Amino acid sequence: MAAMLNLRGILCDMTIPMVMGVMNVTPDSFFAASRIQDEEAIRKRADQILEEGASIIDVGGYSTRPGAEPVSVDDEMHRLACALGIIRKYHSEAIISVDTFRSEVARCSVRDYDVDIINDISGGQLDDNMFQTVADLSVPYILTHSHGLPSLPAFTSSAVTPEDSDMLLAEVARYFATHLQTLNDLGVTDVILDPGFGFGKTLEQNYALMHRLPDLIRTFPDNAFLVGVSRKSMIYKLLGITPDESLNGTTVLHTLALQAGVQILRVHDVRAAVEVVHILQQTQSSIINHS
């Protein structure tokens, strides 16, 4: 499995999994506690993410929750510019990813604020220029398996409909293989794969995909994998609770993802995720030392 990521020309060791802390500069993220908009709140959230042990700050200015209001390019970039400027002011060396499906926003974020990673939940399907833009920018790209984002009118692909886990795994693998080939042909070599939990998948398919995650990771040994399940509906709908009550379920899924071989966890609760990484690392170290 991939253990290195090229960030700003420096190879980043991913032998120990990394935690990516979410910063939503939107008024309507599905998890209310993650919504921040004013300067002081942005600075404090950045401080918290880094102090609790995250390696990456993931900044998003466009909520993709079901029913979210559309956001113009200018509004999205205005939200991001405010947050990115503040983060760079107080944490100039922080590794930052921007959560956007728009190539124009990606270009501005990297050019003007030295953003390190582009996190595209649409897999390039909402902007035909995204892949070429990422190639031009020479930054790592997070390729997400997404079929159907009902909150985005431009996203018209239908949800996946495989009847069993073998078919689902094959569907996701084909998607990754096809888009990886396109990206590689353009010269994009640092591609992080995100199976897209919650995007166009039923609750049952989400859990089937989690079960088969080790198989998917073995299929793409040269790519790092990211999982974003933090407080998502696959947890709170299954348990009959709310996003606010979903930290315990999130921790369980983070444990399963790390055991499967995932290198990056995208999370709202950084401290809890970092603790999972540390505990599993210690467990694996103990097994090696006593073998």
Image (cartoon, helix red, strand yellow):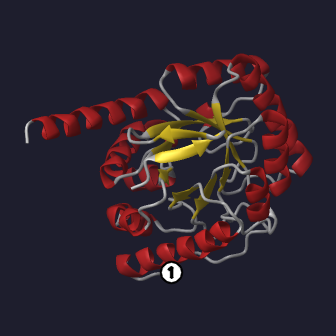
**For the residue labelled by badge 1, is the local secondary structure a helix, a strand or a loop?**
loop
Question: Which image quadrant is residue 248 in?
Answer: top left
How many marks on residues? 1
Of residues 231 and 261, which is closer to you in this image? Answer: 261
Evaluate whether residue 283 shows in this view: yes
The residue depicted at 78 percent of the width and 63 percent of the height is 132
List the single residue furthest toward the left: 291
Specify the quadrant that holds the N terminus: bottom left
Of residues 45 and 130, which is closer to you in this image? Answer: 130
Compared with 43, 207 (above or below) is: below
Residue corresponding to mark 1: 161
Compared with 91, 135 (above or below) is: below
Q: The disc labelled 1 sits on which kind of residue?
A: Thr
Q: Position of residue 4 (x, y in %)?
A: 48, 46
Query: Horizontal placement of 105 versus 243: left or right?
Result: right
Query: Horizontal placement of 40 versus 238: left or right?
Result: right
Query: Horizontal placement of 283 versus 161: left or right?
Result: left
The residue depicted at 60 percent of the width and 31 percent of the height is 33
The residue depicted at 32 percent of the width and 50 percent of the height is 256
Specify the quadrant that holds the C terminus: top left
Question: Which image quadrant is residue 47 in?
Answer: top right
Q: Position of residue 146 (x, y in %)?
A: 60, 66
Evaluate whether residue 147 shows in this view: no
Of residues 244 and 229, which is closer to you in this image? Answer: 229
Compared with 251, 175 (above or below) is: below
Q: Residues within 10 Å of mark 1 (few under 14, many from 20)?
A: some
Q: Position of residue 180 (x, y in %)?
A: 59, 69
Q: Position of residue 116 (x, y in %)?
A: 68, 40
The residue depicted at 66 percent of the width and 60 percent of the height is 188
